[in-house]
Amino acid sequence: MNTIYKKVIANKRITPDECLALYRSAALPELGMMASTVRERLNGKYVYFNRNVHVEPTNICANRCLFCSYRRDENQEGSWDLSLDEIFAIARQYAESDITEVHIVGGVHPHHSLDFYESMVSGVRRILPGVHIKAFTAEELWHMAQQSGAPVAEVLARLKRCGLQSIPGGGAEILNDSLRARICPDKVGAEGWLEVHRSAHRQGIGSNATMLYGHVETYEHRVEHLHRLRCLQDDTGGFNAFIPLKFCKENNSLSDAGEVSAIEELRNMAICRIFLDNILHIKAYWPMCGKVLAQLALSFGADDMDGTIDDSTKIYSMAGAGDKAPRMTVSELCKMARQSRFIPVERDSLYRAVKQY
């Protein structure tokens, strides 16, 4: 631990083997110290947030991931499939608001065409001309390519012309094909997920990255996942932020795996911050981990708290996580940052400062 600590203090990159040693042996206080060192080096005392809203067009999904509490079959109780008019009606609710980002992600619908998604993005762009559109996971984009017969790069280019500006980080789960075959056998493989993001970055479309942890993966799997992300970031520099997402056990087929403790959440947050030295921002996604733990995570490497949300996502609440109606005001986000002795900064989707509070 002393050798690793000295490397972190000296701003030297730790190896995958050293990352594994942190997972196996490091105590929470020393991880907090190391992660805070990296966090302050990259982001000072700032805590970022934005004014955002989610649109979830459907939870009907062709995939059957064991960890998912969100998906439904067509016509199954609890399913929804919004029409373009219904999606546009949601967008119009925010036409006179102060949101700066709309986040569009949902199930991999078995029948929607690429034209449908192009119309969706174009319509939202017309209604919200000044709002950043972050839309479609790598899995959704891969499915659009398979369904349309167009290469992923062409799918991205067409959506970019319609108004797509960045893509979220969902669908990464764990970037190990053996594990993916066990927990999400219908999804694109690890290299396919990475290739979608690589293609997006080459076209100037930034993205986020995630890791779903705390189910049946090992520490070795986590390290492999983080290493593959770090390598891609070395190559493209296109990841804006990394978001560790704890597995939540309610209403899915992996419920017997249980959930990791809050201490393990903070340990994992810190290790991710230490290892991912080339991804500038680490997000504590409060709709998943809850407001209290998100606030604690600011002292373990996190510098971003996502945004206001406005009760517009169901993905984690359906799995029993966090708030059942997730929303926060700007004043609440600022208060949480200040209570932890940080400086709240409202940002845009590319992490440019809008206002310091």
Image: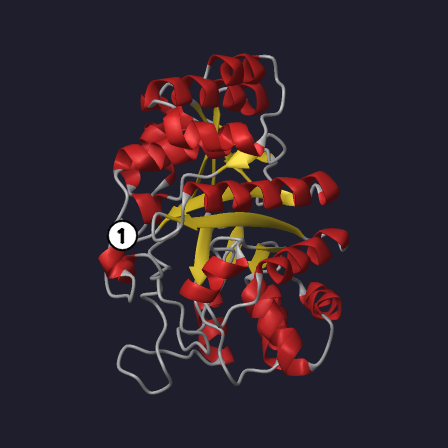
Residue at 54 percent across and 35 percent down: it is 281
| Residue positioned 40% across, 50% down in the render | 217
| Residue 207: image location, x then y, percent | 61, 50
Instruction: Please give the name of the residue rendered at 37% of the width and 18% of the height, measured from the top-left corner.
Output: 341
User: Can see residue 252?
Assistant: yes
Query: How does the figure colour the protein chain or chains?
Result: secondary structure
Kind of residue at badge 1:
Ala
Q: Quadrant of residue 189?
A: bottom right
* Residue 223 percent across, percent down from the top left: 51, 40
- Give 334 or 176, whichever is nearer the viewer: 176
Residue 293's spot in the image, x, y percent? 29, 35
- Assign a secondary structure to mark 1: loop
Q: In the picture, which quadrant includes the C terminus?
A: top left
Q: Measuring from the top left, give residue 59's x and y in whole percent.
A: 39, 73
- Residue 191 in the figure: left or right of residue 22: right
Q: Quadrant of residue 238?
A: top right
Residue 140 to residue 27: above or below: below
From this view, report whether residue 117 is shown above or below residue 350. below
Quadrant containing the N terminus is: top left
Query: Is 188 on the left or on the right of 248, as rendered?
Result: right
Residue nearest the observer in this picture, 268 or 217: 217
Judged left or right of residue 38, residue 261 is left
Up-down relation of residue 187 to residue 176 (above or below): below
Question: Which of these two is toward me, 147 or 286?
Answer: 147
The residue at the point 57 percent across, 45 percent down is 349
Report the residue marked by disc 1: 321
- The reply to whether residue 292 is in sight is no
Q: How many marks?
A: 1
Front in this rendered view, residue 6 or 153: 6
